[in-house]
Image (cartoon, grey):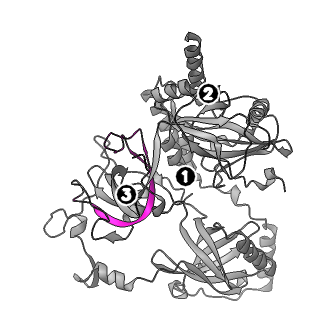
Amino acid sequence: MAVSHRGAISFGLVHIPIGLYTATQDNDIHFNQLCKEDGSRIKYKKICSKCGKEVSNEDIVKGFEYEKDKYVILTDEDFEKAKTEKDRTIHILHFTDLNSIPPIYFEKTYHAIPESGGDKAFELLRRAMKEENKIAVAKTVMGTKEKLLALIPTDTGILVETMFFADELKEAPKEPAKPAVSDAEIQMAKALINAMAQPFEPEKYHDEYRARLWDIINRKIHGKEFVIEPDEIKVDVVNLMDALKQSLEQVGAKQ
Amino acid sequence: MSMFEEKNIKPMLIGAESEPFDSADFIFELKLDGERCIAYLDENGTELRNKRNIKMLPKVPELKDLHIHVNCRCILDGELIIIKDGKPDFFEIQRRSLMSNPLKIELASRQYPACFTAFDILYHVDRPVNDLPLMERKKLLESVIKKESPLFAQSRYIEEKGIAFYELVEKQSLEGIVAKRKDSKYYFDKRTKDWIKIKYLQDDDFVVCGYIIKENNVNSIVLGQYKDGSLVYKGHVTLGVSSEDFREIASQKKLESPPFKVPTGNENAVWVEPVLVCTVRYMMKTQSGGMRHPVFKGLRRDKAPEECVESADK
């Protein structure tokens, strides 16, 4: 698994070198667009909407539409000027309780893995946070973007959650009305909830649409394989090694 | 905690290279072109770690039951390989280790299943056995293996006749062979001169200095190496544009001009800061010092550009 980001947690006077590895993944089934007639891949061409000519990447610039059909052009230099200075340090700003952060702030989860020389300080930080029931709020720069982070200790390591900034949250478009409910009604609803309460076991749930789609794909591939390579000879490593050994013994016998 | 529970073994590495030789003090094994792996096997299951201790089972789920091939708790050292066209195929195992979509992995594991080939035993039942001489470890390895299968094999070895063995390997364009001293012990996390590689296919590391965009989604990477403290031009190797490695190369800071004198054929090159290192595999050097059939093996992150030095024999 490739490291997504390398940095160092700055905690007091120590620097803990770490790598961040994505903790979730997209398991969607992706498709390619093909030409119906001969099955070849469909390609995109970039065409000027006015003259219809194909334009190459070096002839394309970036524009911001500030008014209908009116653009300001931004050059590479403009982007360079706005760039955040690279800062791979994960600055711990303060510690807090996990449940003081509403889940809406959490964006994407990474596993933090200590790199060489960081094992001891990493474990120290993990255990101390875990035993104090605290998580760390931190800031860093990932790619070109400034990121707010939460460092959450677990039994085995530290999870790094990227978080939204407060101004990235959207308010609900409308407040739900809160009509009065009677005590009896609320008691009944609570009883129903408690009757249905169970521990959360995520492995019980699956994307069944994906499973069915995968099953269909598999059956099609299988049918095909049979047609294309009916007499492929399977050579495994044991065959290979034994064949070499045997031919060597034959050479030895001849001499 | 025992070595078995700790699961933090750093394997012994080959520390010498030589020409083919014959010796009664050595055994010779096929050098399998795959990913070095340590297998922790007991009645509860299988755990596979590569030499950087990364968990490998998510990439090769078909090997989750390797432990049924052995008759006791043990730690085995070996090579994780994928056989394609009758030979271990490094690129196939590399491709697999870069996959993350479980459905794609499932498909690949049926089309080209991986195989763990054990060549050493480091732990037996309840104690480390790395202090035993190699030939005793080989005997012990043989005794713990119940059976082989397409997913699990035991490495074969040849006594004494290194030269004849190498010639056979060369004829089949296999990677090479490894000579191992019969009375040698196993030292964790060490490069040992008791293990000697004799390679037909060569690897060398280069600094990525630029790239040339070509037709059909293949690009040339412009290579360099350090000589007397400055970079010198080392030719090209091709690489697909869609690869992760190429994206990383293309995202490097661009330079106005090449870091060295370049021959013709590099007019369209895009020059990048020489900060990335890649490994290139080739069959042998041509007379002029170029590489025959160079293939891009991948970026390597554990080596600094300054360490890619032109070797003396070229």
Viewer-proximal residue, B100 or B125?
Answer: B125
Q: CA distance from mark 2 to mark 3?
A: 39 Å
Residue A155 location in percent, x, y? 77, 68
Q: Quadrant of residue A96?
A: bottom right
Mark 3, residues whose alpha carbon is within 10 Å: few (<14), some, or many (≥20)?
A: many
The magenta span reads: B267-296
- The answer to whether residue B190 is magenta is no
Determine the residue positioned at 56% across, 39% down.
B197
Residue type, numbered disc 3:
Gly
Q: Nearer the viewer, mark 1 or mark 3?
A: 3
Q: CA distance from mark 1 to mark 2?
A: 37 Å
Q: Is residue B230 above or below residue A132?
A: above
**Of the two numbered discs 2 and 3 in the rendering, the one whose residue sits closer to the viewer:** 3
Answer left or right for A150 relative to A217.
Answer: right
Disc 2 target residue: A238
B84 left or right, relative to B137:
left
Q: Amino acid at mark 2?
A: Val
Dot 2 falls on a residue whose secondary structure is helix
**Mark 1 vs mark 2: same chain?**
yes
Q: Position of residue B247 (x, y in %)?
A: 40, 61
Residue B176 visible, this angle: yes
Q: Is residue B276 magenta?
A: yes
Circle nearer the viewer, 1 or 2: 2
Q: Compare residues A157 and B279 and report the one nearer the observer.
A: B279
Q: Which residue is mark 3?
A: B224
Q: Is residue B310 above or below residue B76?
A: below
Q: Picture coordinates of residue A152 (x, y %)?
A: 69, 75
- Residue beneath disc 1: A210
Q: Amino acid at mark 1?
A: Arg
Residues at marks 1 and 3 on the same chain: no
Q: Residue furthest right?
A: B126
